[in-house]
Amino acid sequence: HDGLGRCSGCGIALQTEHPELPGYTPIKALDRDPVICQRCFRIKNYSEASSVTVDQDEFLKLLSKIGDKDALVIHIVDLFDFEGSLISALQRFVGNNPVLLAVNKTDLLPKVTNWNKVRNWVQQQAKAQGLRTVDVVLCSAKQNQGFDYLLEAVNLHRGDRDVYVVGATNVGKSTLINRLIRDYSDLEQELTTSRYPGTTLDMVHIPLDDGASIIDTPGIVYPWRYSELVSRRDLQAIMPDKPLKPSVYQLNSGQSLFIGGLARFDFIEGEHQSFTLYTNNTLKIHRTKLEKADELFENHAGELLSPPTREGLEELPEWTRHDIRISKGSRSDVFISGLGWIKVNGQTGALVAVHAPRGVRVMVRPSLI
Ligand code: GDP
């Protein structure tokens, strides 16, 4: 990489192969003088931040540096993939700095949602993961909802400190940062990028009136999210962009549901009951007998059962099976990171299983809604 030199904006080693990674520049832009990476180019010319991504190790290195500062940390998570996008190691690394949890993509939940209940749920789940938060803000960067409250909370908690924005990939961090750029800074001062000492990461600084900055950090890639495994095309198929329309299935034990060809849900044991699927509305759900499910997948994956396409399927790890016992009287979701969740409506308990590519996080949680 060093062969191409460094970005004169942020100092990062330039590369021309991976648009989503730090230091990317299109080949033709190498002729420019001075040479800057695409990200710095966009920031300088369009006042627009775009996301770069890093792996966990590099991200943790960066986080530990934030722990040495006196700062407010905004942690953005995706409400559609809450457990998948929550940075559970955050508390260990930010030291005594306060964490403001911004829960993005509220527009994806049905319009008639009890938001107080969602907020309590978020608080409890975050706490269970060991994360202490000074505040929880529900917002939609896309629909511009919750922003007044977010800005108020930022002002309240930052004092005169810098603000670091951290999050996993695809949680809407750039969308939110770009809102902040528009709403917050007067833009008379220039946006700048800088390289963080001791890391290979570059970050965007958004100047605030009092000399402090909002600092955007790279998005962390978590390998357990389905959204990180699929192709770009299939990503569009699994990531909802409209409010979820939950679909209810009355099942007897011995029945299975295919979510496209992406995952399979088996109802193995329990009384007749209903299950509610919260997945992207465009995904086709296919109901079948449990005993026929293996064969169906064998013969029709990538066609009747799609996405993924046949080619996409070959790129994915083999399926593995998660057996899950839902205890009596509990209100639970069977959660598949990046793909959505299945709410178990019955209160009589059930034995279920999820088949999904190895590595995708599958777990039970208290019902979100
Ligand atoms: P980043 O990787 O965290 O910087 O995320 P981006 O800002 O690039 O957004 C990732 C994806 O999520 C894009 O497809 C956005 O359109 C989408 N997105 C961002 N904010 C929202 C939101 O509030 N609601 C919904 N439904 N989608 C959002």
Image (tube, helix red, strand yellow):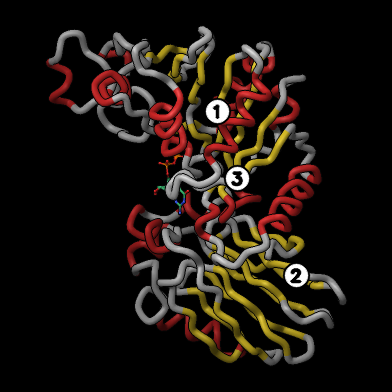
Q: Amino acid at mark 2?
A: Ile
Quadrant hosting residue 248: bottom right
Q: Amino acid at mark 1?
A: Val
Which quadrant would the N terminus be assigned to in this image? top left
Report the side of 112 relative to 98 (left or right): left
Name the N-terminal-most of marks 1 and 2: 1
Q: Position of residue 29 (x, y in %)?
A: 16, 22
Badge 3 density bin: few <14, some 14–19, many ≥20, Cα 10 Å? many
- Which residue shows up at 39% across the image and 67% down it? 308
Q: For this rendering, which residue is in front, 145 or 45?
A: 145
Q: For this rendering, which residue is in front, 363 or 94?
A: 94
- Which residue shows up at 84% across the image and 83% down it? 348
Q: Amino acid at mark 3?
A: Val
Q: What label does residue 103 carry, if any? A: 3
Asked if ligand 1 lies within 8 A of label 2, the reply is no
Asked if ligand 1 lies within 8 A of label 1, the reply is no
Q: Position of residue 265 (x, y in %)?
A: 61, 76
Q: Secondary structure at mark 3?
A: strand
Which residue corresponds to mark 1? 165
Q: Position of residue 226 (x, y in %)?
A: 51, 55
Q: Secondary structure at mark 2?
A: strand
Which quadrant would the C terminus be assigned to in this image? bottom right
